[in-house]
Image (spheres, rainbow, N blue to C red):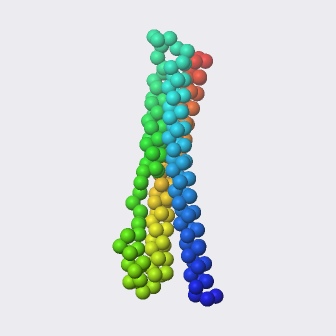
């Protein structure tokens, strides 16, 4: 295969990889926003359920239910805060305008190789940022799952104690 064709193929492959990483970044941000939304909804439901538990103002929720509910609410808040960090800007490699000027002026002896290296650096940077965001997203989902489990346990305790 002639060198110009190899360069075209490699350039297209690299561009595809960059585009894919950009799509992954957007997907992670959308999923993080979904965790924030669902945590807010679940907190609202938890507080609503606690307020309409059918108890009179003199009655109190059992201590175990209160503790479980407060722990669940703390985990929901933690999940939302962690998910919000998925959307925060990350430090990424950029191509300097000085480098672009030099490449455009032909001061670089092999502009294809230099361009290819710059795009590879961008790809590495994007992948690193996406890995970091994915870890945060998994953490926020784990916090949300733990919060749902605690809230479910609180409801179960409340129902068991109401029958006795």
| Percent x, y of residue 61 | 48, 20
* Lateral position of residue 97 relative to residue 122, left or right: left
Task: Give the vertical position of 41 relative to 118 (above or below).
Answer: above
The x, y position of residue 149, in whole percent, is: 55, 37
Residue at 47%, 46% in the rendered image: 83
Residue 142 visible in the snapshot: no
Give the farthest residue toward the left: 98
Q: In this picture, is 92 found above or below 160?
A: below
Q: Nearer the viewer, residue 16 or 52?
A: 16
Give above or below for 64 relative to 29. above
Q: Quadrant of the C terminus?
A: top right
Residue 135 locus on image (x, y percent): 49, 54
Screen quadrant of the N terminus: bottom right
Residue positioned 45% across, 10% down in the render:
58
* Residue at far front of view: 105
> How far across and down, in percent of the image, does residue 18 sit?
53, 66
Q: As rendered, which of 25 and 80 lies closer to the eye?
A: 25
The residue sitting at 48% across, 37% down in the picture is 76
Which residue is depicted at the point 48% across and 63% down?
126
Q: How many marks?
A: 0
* Left or right side of 70 for 9: right
Looking at this view, name the residue that lies furthest to the right: 1
Q: Nearer the viewer, residue 157 or 16?
A: 16
| Residue 120 in view of the camera | yes
């Amino acid at each position: 295969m002639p060198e110009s064709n190899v360069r075209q193929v490699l350039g297209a492959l690299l561009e595809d990889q960059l585009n894919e990483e950009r799509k992954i970044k957007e997907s992670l941000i959308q999923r993080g926003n979904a965790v924030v939304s669902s945590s807010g909804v679940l907190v609202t439901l938890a507080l609503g359920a606690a307020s309409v538990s059918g108890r009179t103002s003199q009655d109190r929720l059992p201590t175990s239910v209160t503790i479980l509910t407060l722990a669940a609410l703390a985990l929901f808040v933690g999940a939302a805060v962690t998910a919000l960090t998925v959307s925060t800007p990350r430090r990424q490699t950029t191509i300097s305008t000085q480098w672009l000027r030099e490449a455009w002026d032909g001061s670089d002896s092999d502009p294809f190789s230099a361009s290819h290296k710059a795009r590879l650096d961008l790809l590495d940077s994007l992948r690193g940022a996406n890995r970091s965001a994915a870890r945060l997203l998994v953490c926020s989902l784990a916090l949300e799952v733990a919060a749902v489990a605690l809230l479910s346990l609180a409801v179960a305790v409340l129902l068991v104690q109401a029958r006795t």
